[in-house]
Amino acid sequence: MLTRRLIVCLDVKGARVVKGVQFVGLRDVGDPVALATRYESEGADEITFLDISASAEERSTLLDVARRTAEQLFIPLTIGGGIRTADDVARALRAGADKVSVNSAAVTRPEVLTESADRFGAQCVVASIDAKRDEQGVWRVWVKGGREQTPLEAVAWAQECVSRGAGEVLLTSIDRDGARIGYDTDLTRAVSNAVHVPVIASGGAGRAEHLVEAIETGHADAVLVAGILHDGVTTVRALKDVMRSAGIPVRDIPVEVAA
Amino acid sequence: MSSSPLRVTVFDYEAGNLHSLVKSLETDFTEVRVETDPAAAVRDTDALVLPGVGAFSPAAVKLASGRDAMRDALLGGLPCLGICLGMQLLFDGSEEGPGTGLGVLSGQVTRLAAERVPQIGWNTLEDTTPRDTLLVESDLQTAYYANSFVCRPTGESARHVIAYTTHERDRFPAAVRVGNVVGTQFHPEKSSAAGVRFVRAFLREAASHVTRGVGL
């Protein structure tokens, strides 16, 4: 049976993980390679690097980080942020990403999804969608890191992304992001029921029960977690234990690396 | 074990990321090279690896000039590990697109019969009996998949399935083995510690063939 995934997201700027990450006993707490492999040993099913680089120099540094990470990480790695063209996708894949997520660029030019899927297969093209409810209660798509609203409606946009070649949807609720009050299960369910590819719920995880809700009520195939892990509020193991107890199929955490 | 390193060649159809795969193949008894020419890939090597990223047709095009040489080498006993698309290339053809596979196993590659496609994530393996030595040694139980297509072995080839996986209601071969040729629909190089152990078990087995070959 296909298990539900717990994906850990790290914000990376150049060669460093930014935002606080509080692992006890890890010497270089800002090193993406060390953190990614540490989360793998804790039982994370996948790692996502969100590139928040502000310059071309930082961006090329990140590709080097991806290369070093891929040589030590033996679970899937997704890279997102700043991807504009199919050539950008090619560079990220060559550097060591298994999947690449595309956000603003897909809104500007949706053909980038098709071009990337044709070259590398749908399974490595992730449509990243940031959604926020407007005054009328409609989920609108926002771009440029949540700074700019578009007229697009999130569910219809997700369907278009999939029809254009995306093999997975990473769905972030801007309303919930960082709030730790739970994922937007209505949004997640609406998108998940409207597309035939896996949907990753993102934004709002505060405790383990929120992950269970996103999967059971929101019909998410995977859940993305960041802050509560980096801040040491909980652990991958504790989150997965609760998911398993709730009857959700999850990958067992290997004993030999968990000790 | 032979004192000279096991020569492992990865056939690169230039479709994507080989970093984790190459790293998983690098051990203290292997020497790994990446080769884009299919005929050269089976020369001067002790094991061949067909990686898992890309689409069937472009890969079949890259394979075409060396297809017969590669097929002969595999039928002649060269140890081979085909991963995902690499496993699919062991079969006759694919409905994903035109092109001829190696035909080491008979059957076609068809689309997963499921609602959620591609299948992306960790799925459980159902071993056949007796459990294959690679699965015993690695104790791989849940493996990472990223695929829209699966292999459908026909005739005798159906007996070469060593594990199955089920996505929704579609039960498909997770892994096959015919002689020294092993195919996995999952990505062992992305299946964490147990997946890497699976790759290493394959390499150790390949090394034991080389040692035996030298003794003949």
Image (cartoon, coloured by chain):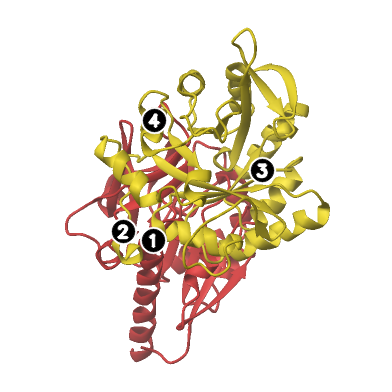
Tell me the CA gap for discs 4 and 1: 26 Å
Q: Residue at x 54, y 64 (%)?
A: A34
Tell me the CA gap for discs 3 and 2: 31 Å
| Callout 2 crowding tier (Cα within 10 Å): few <14, some 14–19, many ≥20 | many
Mark 4, secondary structure of its residue: helix
Q: Nearer the viewer, residue B213 or A59?
A: A59
Mark 3, secondary structure of its residue: helix
Q: Mark 4 or mark 3: which comes first in sequence?
A: 3
Q: Mark 1 or mark 2: which comes first in sequence?
A: 2
- Residue ID for mark 4: A215
What chain does badge 3 belong to? A
Q: Nearer the viewer, residue A34 or A178?
A: A178
What chain does badge 2 belong to? B
Q: Colour of chain B?
A: red
Marks 1 and 3: which is nearer the front?
1
Tell me the CA gap for discs 4 and 2: 26 Å
- Residue ID for mark 3: A119
Residue A192 is tagged as none
To which quarter of the image does residue A120 belong? top right
